[in-house]
Structures are given as C-alpha cells and as structure tokens.
Image (cartoon, grey):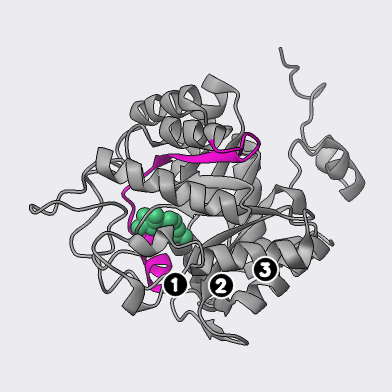
Amino acid sequence: MSGSYPNLRLRRTRASGWSRALHRETLLTPADLIWPLFVTEGSGVEEPIATLPGVSRWSVDGIARRAREAVELGIPCVALFPNTPAAKRSDDGAEALNPDNLMCRAVKAIRDACGHDVGILTDVALDPYTSHGQDGLVDAAGYVVNDDTVAVLVDQALNQAEAGADIIAPSDMMDGRIKAIRMALEMNGHPNVQIMSYAAKYASAFYGPFRDAVGSSGLLKGDKKTYQMDPANGDEALREVALDIEEGADSVMVKPGLAYLDVIWRVKQEFRVPVFAYQVSGEYALIEAGAAAGVGDRDALLMEKLLAFKRAGCSGVLTYHAPVAARLLGA
Ligand code: PBG
C-alpha cells in the first residue's frame, strides 16, 4: 500500500534532522560491535601492522588494556587471534593445545582485568599454529583432511574454554566440527560456553592483511578453496548455516561482510537466528586506503558500511574499526 504525489511526498520526513532521527529504521550502537585483537609475545610490546594501518599486535598486558578500553567504550566483546612465534609452529599445530599458549594467557589476562564485563571470543582453527599456514592437518598430497582435523579442533576448543573463553568461534570450515565441539563442551562442564560458527566463510581475496597480522601469509602455499566456500555460491551458504544451527551453533557468521550482504539477508530471512558479519582485514584496509587517497571522509565511509550490516539483518559486526566507531557513536 502506498500513496501518490502530492499526497505522499517522501521528502517531507527528510526535511530536518529531528525528523530524520525520528524516522530512522536502523540503529548502530557500540553494543553491536566485536573488536578483533592480535596478540603477540613479550610485555609492553606494540607492533603496528603495515597492511592494517591503525591496528597493532599487542602483548598480553596490552591486550588486557584494550579489553578495558572496550568496556569503557561499551563494546561488549573482543575476539582474539595469536601471532604464534615461528619456533612454536609445527605441521600439526600442536601449540593450539598448549594450556599456556598466547591465546590462553590473553584470555586469562582479560578476565583478571575485566571480570565478566566483556565477552571473550576465541578463534578455533589451526592456521596461526601450523608451519604450512592451513587451518587444518594436511596429508601427503597437501589436502586438508577433515575428520582428523575436527578431533584436534575439539581439543583446541576445550583448551580455550578451560582458559575462560565465553564464545568459541570455529573459523576452519571443516564439516561436522560444530556438533563435535558442542558435545565436548557439554560433556566437559562448559554448557554455557557459546559457539559462534563461521558458517558461511568464503575463500576470499580480502584476508591478506589478517594473514600478515598472524604471521601466516609467508607460510601459506596455495589457497583454502577445498574448505572455504566459493564466492559464487549463495544457496550453499544456507545449507552451511542450516547444518551449523542443527549441530548446536548459538549464532552464525558470514565472512567477509560487504561483498556478501545478500547472503546475510538470506540467512536472516530464512532462519531468524542471530547473524554476525565479519568485516575482514581487506575491507578495513580498503576504507583506510580510500580515505587516505581522498575518496571521502573516513569516519563517514566506515559508519555507512557498518550501518549496512545492521540494515541487512546483522545482530552485530566484527570490525577492526570497533573502537573508532564506538567513539564516533559517542560512547
Ligand atoms: C583463519 C582466519 C582468517 C580470518 C579469520 N580467521 C583468514 C583465513 O581464513 O585465511 C580472516 C580475518 C580477516 O581477514 O580479517 N582461520
């Protein structure tokens, strides 16, 4: 049902700021943001990441301070990614199971500094720990094997849950891992630890700066196309999401973000579950590079893109712009 001109003039409600505010359909707040953080060894260390201008790796003490900052800014959750020292990377990624690895130490430091004022999301996948940079175990032919990898991911998830993680986020795209992790959490006294599944994760060209940040870009040979999704596929994303919900995911993620808004929309319409977008490193870097090249105002560019995720149906967004956006939103 709609009127017609001149009874209906859609510009009427746009004519002043108060009216635009009153008719705004979508709201972005700091509570919609998850802040990804990169952890590195040492103390008092900050290492800027060249391909992610404005983002640094922090040693565990610095990570705890960033988490405190998140609380002050009203950002409800941080996501952790380790830059494992080269000497601790191996074919089988065994460092992922070490209860004293960077990730576990960072989780504990955040808990000590912030209690339960901030959620801690930990990434499950082997790429920050393997000497080949793949997310799982690799056979003689170089193929990432599924079921043996899932067994390791279960132990990795339990290791993170024991350290105090609130949300386990498997980013590996192995088949069946959500069910296996859910069962292990149930059987080992972690019934309230959530799973946010990277359900529709694409084999994307936008992950480059992230791989620099976790130190896997120089190690990775080939690509991840035998497990991450083909960017051409949308129906398949719905099948991935359906499986992960059935297997026990509390929320699902679409990754990358902006190039997959149609997928976000379809997932939300079809399943009505909490959906999150990961605005990935390449997306962040493009905004920064565009602004530096004079394309537009950086703050306006980044806020418009974050709002798009909410309009498409997201409950929230993982974004390296989280602290900037929270400040702009007047936290
Ligand atoms: C790997 C992982 C990746 C990202 C998050 N987890 C990269 C990849 O799959 O190679 C990318 C995030 C980003 O680009 O910001 N398990």
Q: Residue furthest bottom?
A: 44
Q: Where is the C terminus found, in terms of image quarters?
A: bottom right
Q: Which residues are magenta?
A: 188-212
Numbered tag placed on residue 83 in the rendering: 1
Q: Nearer the viewer, mark 2 or mark 1?
A: 1
The quadrant of the picture showing ligand 1 is: bottom left
Residue at disc 1, secondary structure: loop
Numbered tag placed on residue 109 in the rendering: 3
In the image, residue 57 sits, relative to residue 176, either above or below, namely below
Residue at left offset 19%, top offset 53%: 138
Residue at left offset 41%, top offset 60%: 96
Locate residue 201, reporting x and y percent: 39, 44
Locate residue 148, reporting x and y percent: 26, 43
Residue holding disc 2: 291
Residue at disc 2, secondary structure: helix
Locate residue 169, reporting x and y percent: 51, 46
